[in-house]
Amino acid sequence: MAMATATTGTLFIRTPLFRSISLATKPHSFHLKASAMEGREIKEEENVGGTEKKKIFVAGATGSTGKRIVEQLLAKGFAVKAGVRDVDKAKSTFPGANPNLQIVKADVTEGSTKLAEAISDDSEAVICATGFRRSWDLLAPWKVDNYGTVNLVEACRKQNVNRFILISSILVNGAAMGQLFNPAYIILNVFGLVLVAKLQAEQYIRKSGINYTIIRPGGLRNDPPKGNIVMEPEDTLYEGSISRDQVAEVAVDALLHPESHYKVVEIVARIEAPKRSFEELFGSIKQR
Ligand SMILES: NC(=O)c1ccc[n+]([C@@H]2O[C@H](COP(=O)([O-])OP(=O)(O)OC[C@H]3O[C@@H](n4cnc5c(N)ncnc54)[C@H](OP(=O)(O)O)[C@@H]3O)[C@@H](O)[C@H]2O)c1
């Protein structure tokens, strides 16, 4: 059963056609149970007078970006269900007990039914930070970055979770952008056409009706952020890099800003770029 949530100020409801209706509300908290696939506005501070935290499922939680997403979600007061392939690895990635962090096994190649069980009916949104690991399996990019992501969307459908945030990549549509001979496009696609696999998954998400934010970062860096975030529409950026900390920030803030709904955003960091709020950044991108 889907649930729409009202918090102080504004109530956002999605109709079955996924049009957003914004209603002014009095400052109180309640849950509205509604029909399948309605959307929910995610807020950090939830249930005034209550203790329930919004739970976010993170796929690929032990990855370099995924673990930052988990850490930032926890720091911002969310509860997290960390979906991982290897529970023991996750226990060392996230040492110490945290009542707001739950670790569950979730291999995206194992199909939507198992994933739906992992996501369960208590997750408000899914953030997908998976990426294939290099191996002798040339089909790994298709299994993980295409079918794996599709499986996650189908699992969301099974659990009536209607918010999906994907970490994709700039240049996924490089061929259409005239970047066929861009070395980054060539090199990345040498590994099992991973950009093509990601693009196919994006297209599936966009047709699915789920409320999505597709984040396409430039080259990922483990270093702390250098420069401010630059956000551009799809098929715009073909070079540049960004700290994984900033990518995680964009993913978490997408949960908090309705300006991010149904959008594809490309991000890099630039020293000379002005600092802009997430309202401004997401608000500057048009829905297509
Ligand atoms: N590297 C770049 O410069 C770059 C640039 C743009 C976009 N991206 C994209 O950004 C995303 C995050 O990149 P990253 O470098 O931070 O990722 P990463 O460190 O390579 O982590 C990938 C995560 O995906 C998980 N994973 C792999 N196969 C899986 C499966 N079958 N089921 C469930 N989880 C699976 C891995 O699990 P384990 O921990 O168990 O291995 C890991 O947690 C990826 O989609 C990547 O393609 C990367």
Image (tube, rainbow, N blue to C red):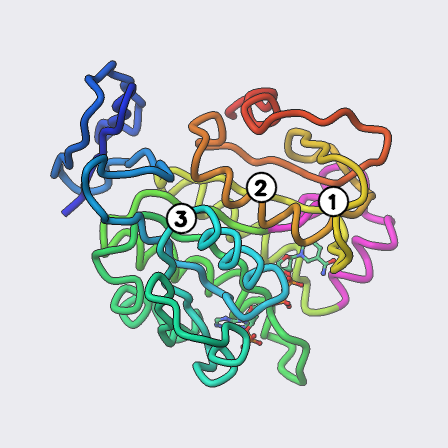
Please tell me in which quadrant of the rendered image residue 12 appears. Answer: top left
Give the residue displayed 46% in from the left and 59% down from the top: 149
Residue 145 in view, yes or no: no
Left or right: where 6 falls relative to 67: left
Main SS type for the magenta part? loop
Q: Earlier in the sequence, mark 1 or mark 3?
A: 3
Q: Look at the numbered disc 2 and say if its residue's Cβ is closer than 8 Å to ligand 1.
A: no
Q: Which residues are drawn in magenta? A: 168-190
Observer-side mark, 2 or 3, equals: 3
Whole-percent x, y for residue 96 in the image: 45, 75
Most foreground residue, 194 or 56: 56
- Residue 225 lies in magenta, yes or no? no
Q: Which residue is mark 1?
A: 174
**Amino acid type of disc 2?**
Val
Rendering coords of residue 65 (x, y %): 61, 59
Image quarter for ligand 1 equals: bottom right
Q: Amino acid at mark 3?
A: Gly
Identify the image quadrant of residue 31: top left
Instruction: Say which residue label 3 marks.
Output: 77
Report the amino acid beneath label 1: Gly
Q: Earlier in the sequence, mark 1 or mark 2?
A: 1
Q: Residues within 10 Å of mark 3 (few under 14, many from 20)?
A: some
Residue 217 position, x and y percent, is: 68, 46
* Placement of 185 over or under 6, stated as above or below: below
Instruction: Reply above or below: 276 against 184.
Output: above
Q: Residues within 10 Å of mark 2 (few under 14, many from 20)?
A: many
- Residue 250's disc is 2
Q: Element type at marker 3?
A: loop
Residue found farthest to the top: 24
As drawn, 140 above or below 131:
below
Residue at the image position 32 percent from the left and 53 percent from the top: 55
Q: Judging from the image, what secondary structure is the residue with disc 2 in? A: helix
